[in-house]
Amino acid sequence: MINFWSSFCSYGILMLITVAVCGIGIFLGITLRKKKNAEAAGESAPAEKEA
């Protein structure tokens, strides 16, 4: 019975890590895409001009 719970907890922790990595990837992907779309539309702040 202990082996069952050990295996169950091991897979549970692995699942949580996988979900966390996927969540971070989705968040970064959405953020970077929004930034790229804003730059393409010309909504980004203008670059600093040299004097």
Image (spheres, helix red, strand yellow):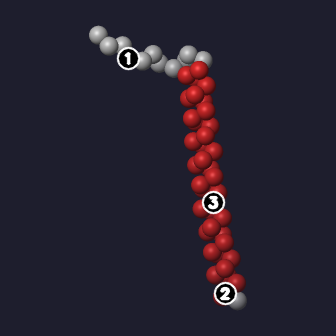
The kind of residue on which mark 2 rests is Asn
Q: Quadrant of the N terminus?
A: bottom right
Q: CA distance from mark 2 to mark 3?
A: 23 Å
Left or right: residue 49 versus residue 36 is left
Q: Nearer the viewer, mark 2 or mark 3?
A: 3
Whichever of callouts 1 and 3 sits on the residue coming sooner in the sequence is 3
Q: Which mark is residue 48?
A: 1
Helix, strand or loop status at disc 2: helix
Q: Residues within 10 Å of mark 2 (few under 14, many from 20)?
A: few
Disc number at residue 18?
3
Look at the numbered discs 1 and 2 and tell me whether their residues touch, using CB distance below 8 Å: no
Question: In the rendered image, which residue does mark 2 sit on?
Answer: 3
- Residue in the picture at 42% in, 18% down: 47
**Image spot of residue 21 (x, y percent):** 59, 55
Of 45 and 51, the residue lying toward us: 51
- Residue 43: image location, x then y, percent: 55, 17
